[in-house]
Amino acid sequence: MSAILEVKGLEVAYGHIEAVKGIDFSLNEGEITSLVGANGAGKSTTLLALSGLIKKRAGSVIFDGEDLTRLPAHKIVERGVVQVAEGRAILTTMTIRENLELGAYTRRDRANVASDLEMVFTLFPRLLERVDGLAGNLSGGEQQMLAIGRALMAKPRLLLLDEPSMGLAPIIVQGIFRTLREINSKGLTIFLVEQNVRQALKIAQRGYVLENGEIALSGNGRDLLDNPRVLEAYLGA
Ligand code: ATP
């Protein structure tokens, strides 16, 4: 397995609050990697730093051999590193179709947009059923599907997700995670940030546990699920 993304010594601070304290991690191409941890551990901050949406104090980000460390956010998206927004950030007064088309707007290969729209509807038939309805009328789970669909329309090579399970019922979360696996099985590399430690590690080939801005543990997703420290701290054992 080769690393498609390599992060070294990443540090991010908000004023004098050091949120991420020099972490190293890598993502293997074609795998799901989960970054889990408690509220405030620094997970969202790590993701924002990868997307170029927040300033890094130190460290480097290499994606597919290219140094992205100092690239602005829009250039990072152009390289294929696409984040599904937390809280979904869909445009509620636009239709589902319009939201999905917006996802594709930075693309140059217009010819493939129609077939990718088909692909999103195959993954999420519910979105097709409501394609001309307003996004604001969708349920929370459907909005999350739309947010993922919109990110897929940007033709990612690496998909970043910040807490897709947030605020959703367990049965809906299971559906979302099943779909992430399906997307991954078609070859897309996924980096998943989650507080839902059990589900996130279950679908991950590799996992990292973040505590107070530092990587406390790493390993195969299933092995981490059996780790006594993970069981005790995150799974209520
Ligand atoms: P959550 O699941 O709540 O999003 P997280 O693991 O993603 O948690 P971060 O949101 O990355 O954690 O926060 C890491 C630390 O940085 C916390 O101590 C948080 O209070 C602090 N922090 C986050 N955003 C800001 C901000 N805009 N200004 C100041 N401090 C912040």
Image: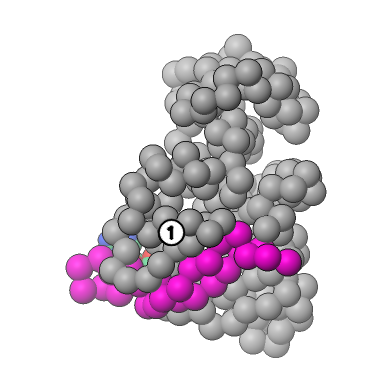
* Picture coordinates of residue 218, whole percent (x, y): 62, 79
Q: Residue furthest top?
A: 132
- Figure label count: 1
Q: Residue 166 location, x and y as percent? A: 56, 51
Ligand 1 visible in quadrant: bottom left
Q: Amino acid at mark 1?
A: Asp
Name the residue that disc number 1 marks. 67
Most extreme residue toward the front is 65
Magenta range is 1-28
Give the residue furthest to the bottom.
Answer: 228
In this view, 3 is above or below 106: below
Our reading of the magenta stretch's main secondary structure is: strand
Q: Residue at x 38, y 59 (%)?
A: 69
The response on whether ligand 1 sits within 8 Å of label 1 is no
Residue at position x 44%, y 46% in the image:
76
Q: Residue furthest left?
A: 15
Q: Quadrant of the N terminus?
A: bottom right
Q: Residue at x 58, y 68 (%)?
A: 26
- Residue 2 percent coordinates (x, y): 68, 65
Of residues 169 and 174, the one nearer the viewer is: 174
The chosen color scheme is one colour
Closest to the observer, 96 or 138: 96
In the displayed structure, does residue 40 sit left or right of residue 175? left
Q: Measuring 72% from the left and 71% from the top, which residue is drawn there?
A: 221
> Could you tell me which secondary element the residue under label 1 belongs to?
strand
18 is within the stretch colored magenta: yes
Quarter assignment of residue 64: bottom right
Q: Residues within 10 Å of mark 1 (few under 14, many from 20)?
A: few
| Quadrant including the C terminus | bottom right
Where residue 36 sits: x, y (%)?
Answer: 57, 68
